[in-house]
Structures are given as C-alpha cells and as structure tokens.
Image (cartoon, rainbow, N blue to C red):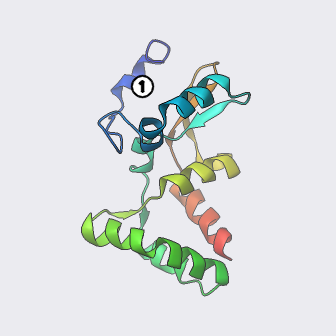
C-alpha cells in the first residue's frame, strides 16, 4: 500500500495497541488477512488516527445523552464509564468512539469527505465531518 499511496506514510501512525497496530488487527491477524484479501465488497478502513482527530465536544455530548428519550438514556448508560474515563482520566478534549465513527461512515457517506485509496479494494477514511456526526448521533437517540 505504501508503494501505491506514498503520502500515507506521512500520516502520524500511533495505533491503539502498538505504534503501528490497531487492536482488532493485532489480536486476530488471521481474521484480518481473510477480511482484507477475500472480501467481495470494497473495504473502507477508518484508522485509529482518524478517530482520535475527530472529537465531539463534551458540552454537545452531555446534551446528546440527556435528550430524555429511551435511546439517549441507553447510550448514556452504555457509554457513561467510557466518557468519564476519556474526559476525567485521559483529559481528552471530547468524545470519540471508534466503532461508532466506523458505523457512521457506512450509514452516511456524507460524514467522510476525506478519503484516500486506489482502485483496489481498500479506501482509508482520513477525515470526518463532525457536524454530520452530531446530527446522525442526535437522530440516533430521538
């Protein structure tokens, strides 16, 4: 891939398990190989580095999980511990959930204005529209 997309090497690779290893890829490399080589559909990767560059501010998150709907209460209950750790322990500037971001790029392609990739079967999502994410997440809990 670096030969096809040399600029990808300029991205800041930090991974979330090792300096270059994403959790799911490191924990199950055989499953990763199968998915990347045998998938019949085009693959879209949302790297960890993309996720940590796209935080949703804490004020918005507080409003989001307190919309007083069944769904917003469920999201609050499920994500409360993670949000507390991200905000209070890690002192991050906002909320970012990699699985939720990856899902959003599939459900609404408008959330991913920045993509790199070549004709083969993998595209990298490098930029996300946090305003579109906020609208999607708000609709999700209504």
* Residue 88: x %, y % from top left: 28, 72
Residue nearest the observer in this picture, 113 or 70: 70
Q: Residue at x 66, y 69 (%)?
A: 140
The image position of residue 71, as x and y in percent, is 65, 77
Q: Is residue 137 visible?
A: yes
Residue extending farthest top: 3
In the image shown, does 93 or 87 lie closer to the viewer? 87
Vertical side of 62 occupied by 17: above or below: above
Q: Quadrant of the C terminus?
A: bottom right
Q: Position of residue 16 (x, y in %)?
A: 35, 45
Residue 108 makes an appearance in the image: no
Q: Position of residue 13 (x, y in %)?
A: 33, 34
Q: Relative to residue 135, is residue 57 drawn left or right?
A: left
Q: How many marks?
A: 1
Above or below 28: residue 67: below
Question: What residue lies at 59% left-to-right and 58% top-to-bottom?
Answer: 132
In the image, taking residue 95 as reference, residue 128 lies left or right, namely right
Residue extending farthest to the right is 40
- Name the residue carrying label 1: 8
Image quarter of residue 56:
bottom left
Q: Quadrant of residue 27?
A: top left
Residue that appears at 52% across and 41% down = 46
Give SS at disc 1.
Answer: helix
Q: Residue at x 36, y 31 (%)?
A: 11
Q: Is residue 2 above or below residue 44?
A: above
Q: Residues within 10 Å of mark 1 (few under 14, many from 20)?
A: some
């Amino acid at each position: 891939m670096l030969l096809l997309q040399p600029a990808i090497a300029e991205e800041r690779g930090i991974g979330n398990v090792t300096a270059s290893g994403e959790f799911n890829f490191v924990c199950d490399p055989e499953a990763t190989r199968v998915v990347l080589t045998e998938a019949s559909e085009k693959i879209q990767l949302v790297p960890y580095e993309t996720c940590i560059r796209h935080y949703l501010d804490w004020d918005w998150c507080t409003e989001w999980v307190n919309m007083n709907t069944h769904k917003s209460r469920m999201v609050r209950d499920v994500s409360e511990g993670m949000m507390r750790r991200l905000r209070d322990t890690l002192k991050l500037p906002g909320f970012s959930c990699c699985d939720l971001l990856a899902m959003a790029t599939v459900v609404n392609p408008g959330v991913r204005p920045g993509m790199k990739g070549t004709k083969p079967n993998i595209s990298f999502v490098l930029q996300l529209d946090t305003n579109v994410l906020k609208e999607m997440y708000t609709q999700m809990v209504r």
